[in-house]
Image (cartoon, rainbow, N blue to C red):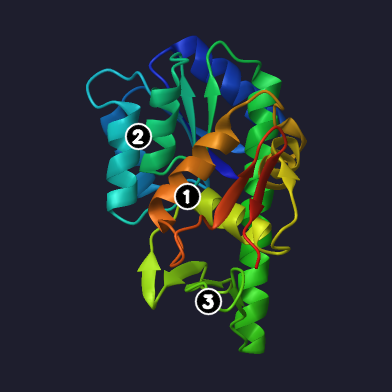
Amino acid sequence: MAHILVVDDEPRIREVVSAYLAREGHLVSEAADGDRALEVARVDPPDLIVLDVMLPGRSGFDVLRALRTHGVEVPVILLTARDEVVDRVAGLEIGADDYVTKPFEPRELVARIGALLRRVARTGVAQSASLADEVTPVRAAGPAFFDLTIDDAAREVRRAGTAIPLTRTEFDLLAALCEQPGRVWTREQIGARLFGEAFDAFDRTIDSHVKNLRHKLGPRSDGGAYVETVRGVGYRAARP
């Protein structure tokens, strides 16, 4: 069971989403505006937030930005009626883990929530095991001349010793690709790895995350990209 905060100014949407989540055994809190959402998140921190973008007063983007600015890394799924790529990318750049476009099927949203919670739980188990063993695995992302390292235990990426701030999903994406440099992953495979079976093969979320990741990592020392596009197929981590 997880504590999930549902933030939307439409009572009917809160009611339906809360009912579906309660049916899955989750504890649900509700908020109708951004200020109330931040108050609930502060007083009774949730395990995941479903956050509408178009809120009265403080927007969902403002709420998400405030959370991330204060170091709150709770997973966030955005609900948005906007279908413009620029708006979806903006949310992912601020730190959202996923988004669902209105109108949506409640069962799909619940499935995405479940997949994200499972991913977070797996990460927590991996971190606990690493700490118990006093082992900090560090994996180089590609050949030796790459100056990028991935610390799985700390969930930290460094370039030439400098930490690069990545969202939870961006880190998981990079770590997955770098398990086998050179292996080509389709969007469907990446989506299933990150979001579970609820991932929509026609969803462009993966493209947005890759774009954000490339921007934050910058080019390699030789001018190439850490994450390469395989036209018509998907993506791969660079190899020698």
Q: Quadrant of residue 201?
A: top right
Residue positioned 70% across, 22% down in the render: 107
Residue positioned 41% across, 44% down in the render: 95
From mark 1 to mark 3, how far is it between C-alphas? Answer: 20 Å
Which comes before the other along the chain, label 2 or label 3? 2
In terms of secondary structure, where does tag 2 sit?
Answer: helix
Q: Which mark is residue 171?
A: none
Q: Residue furthest bottom?
A: 134
Q: Are marks 2 and 1 in contact (CB under 8 Å)?
A: no
Vertical comparison of 151 with 15: above or below: below
Q: Which residue is mark 3?
A: 145
Q: Residues within 10 Å of mark 3 (few under 14, many from 20)?
A: few
Which comes before the other along the chain, label 2 or label 1? 2
From mark 2 to mark 3, how far is it between C-alphas? Answer: 46 Å
Q: Which residue is mark 1?
A: 213
**Amino acid tagged 3:** Phe
Q: Which residue is mark 2?
A: 37
